[in-house]
Image (cartoon, coloured by chain):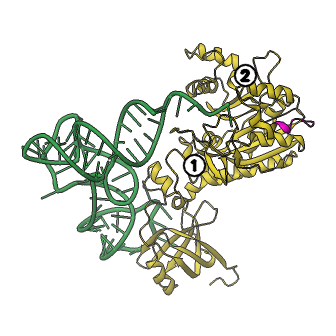
Chain colours: A yellow, B green
Amino acid sequence: MCQWCVVLRICGWIIRKKVFGRIVIIEVSGDTSIKPHVLVLKRDREPELFKLGKELDVGSAICFEGDVSPIQKSKRGVEYLVRRIDVYSTPLDPLPVDTIGKVPALLDTRIKYRYLLLRNPVEKAVFRIRAGIIEAARRFFIERGFMEVHTPKIVAAGAEGGATLFPVKYFEYNAYLSQSPQLYKQMLMASIPRVFEITPYFRAEKFNTTRHLNESWGIDAEQGFIRDEEDVMKTLEELISYIVDYIRRSYAEDLEVLGVELKPLTTPFKRLRYDEVIDMLSSEGIEIPEGEDLTDAAEKKLGEIMVEKGYEIYYIVGFPWKTTGFYYMRKEDGIHTGKFDLDYKGLEIASGGQREHRYDKLVEALKDKGLNPENFKFYLEAFKYGMPPHGGFGLGVERLMMKMLGLQNIREAIIFVRDRTRLTP
RNA sequence: GCCGCCGUAGUAUAGCCCGGCCUAGUAUGCGGGCCUGUCGAGCCCGUGACCCGGGUUCAAAUCCCGGCGGCGGCGCCA
């Protein structure tokens, strides 16, 4: 054999096997490469391995040692001359799903067996890109002087309403799973001018739609000493175009196997005023009641109009106070706020804005929203000692993925799904 | 919380509307044979399913009722 070659040891799972009389061809997938490793075992050249390979089942977990073969006939991946195969585990039953993508599986089945389907490099591509998005976001923030923080996921009552929170028992206290790091990252504005967090959101809404999860992930940021929400919007649009660029550059092969043509995004993104949006929708026959938030149908319609005009991604700014959380800063007219949404192809993927940083105004805002300031004492306290003007945003990871990759269901964007009825796997 | 659609081998589906031609078809998988470097290999043989319970009927995969499960729409989603 090729005695000067470097012997490689490669591990993974057999995803396909073909036997032809004197030759066995085995495809192994395991590491992050898109193409499988192709093991060619010949009866006349390596009789022992040939015999072993013939009996190995698809799905087995193996490692092999060998060299890249001088003969490369396979159209699927790199061929190896194999010297040794270690078999660690063979399937007890044939695999319940097809891991090479020949036979389709329904969404429910796909979710149940995702951990197996991911042996297919094509299936893996979506989640490799997900990892790439997170990686890009981290790089972006670090380059810009944001510090990564971790805020509690078990929180006390009163983070607004409570009906949409999951209750948890916390010794003798009532606690909830965090819906958003919102209040905590704001509190940090008292000492760290730029923070970000990559975090799960837990939401107890009983929805069953293609764009909602009960456990989803967000990329959250907050920055202090801003002039107004425009500073935050600038950060967000730069983040998103950075992510898109990064994925286009570093995950081109994954995009290709998914058949996705990801267009670069140019900044700044288009800004639409809320009032302007209401008028646009009205002329399309969709009436939004005075001062109400946009419905999903309205967002979708707006998305169509905007895509037609050449804007895939755009901000909606100046939401009326009536539609927003208590913590958004009110404009001088007393009606509009510094809250914005970011919509990508008709889906809200992020929202944020300038927050109210003045203690008195914040207490007033809580009362205005019918909330008891007593319940927000720990939060309000942080506004007493030199809180700078600040703002931030939360960006939904799965929603961003849906629009970047053209996924039809948000459940395709997360490996293990938590939705209305799914608690396992 | 309200509404709609769906539930057939391991997987994906046909059949259901219009009950009997269903001993439930097809693809893929799995077992075997032929072929022997395939490229979603090919050909042949075998294997395996009507979600559960009740009802209507001479006869139910098919019609009706209930349950369970899935998918989606609305509400809701700071």
The quarter of the picture where residue A273 lies is top right
Q: In x, y percent, where is residue A340?
A: 73, 28
- Residue range (magenta): A380-387
Q: Which quadrant is the N terminus of chain A positioned in?
A: bottom right
Count residues near mark 1 (Cα–Cα under 10 Å), then give few for <14, some for 14-19, many for 20+: some
The residue under label 1 is A258
- The Cα–Cα distance between marks 2 and 1, rounded to whole angstroms, is 42 Å
* Secondary structure of residue under mark 2: helix
Return the residue nearer the eye: A126 or A85.
Answer: A126
Q: In x, y percent, where is residue A51?
A: 46, 83
In the rendered view, would you say B32 is above or below B4? below
Kind of residue at disc 1 = Leu
Which one is in front in this view, the residue at disc 2 or the one at disc 1? 2
Would you say residue A368 sits in the magenta stretch? Answer: no
The residue under label 2 is A321
Judge whether residue A62 can be spotted in this image.
yes
Return the residue nearer the eye: A194 or A90.
Answer: A194
Q: In x, y percent, where is residue A173?
A: 68, 49
In the rendered view, would you say A394 is above or below A332? below
In the rendered structure, the answer to whether residue A54 lies left or right of residue A329 reads left
Kind of residue at disc 2 = Trp
Q: Are marks 2 and 1 in contact (CB under 8 Å)?
A: no
- Residue at 50% from the left image edge and 39% from the top image edge: A208
Return the residue nearer the eye: B37 or A194.
Answer: A194
- Residue at 54% from the left image edge and 60% from the top image edge: A115
Task: State which chain disc 2 sits on.
Answer: A
Say whether disc 2 or disc 1 marks the residue closer to the N-terminus.
1
The quarter of the picture where residue A192 lies is top right
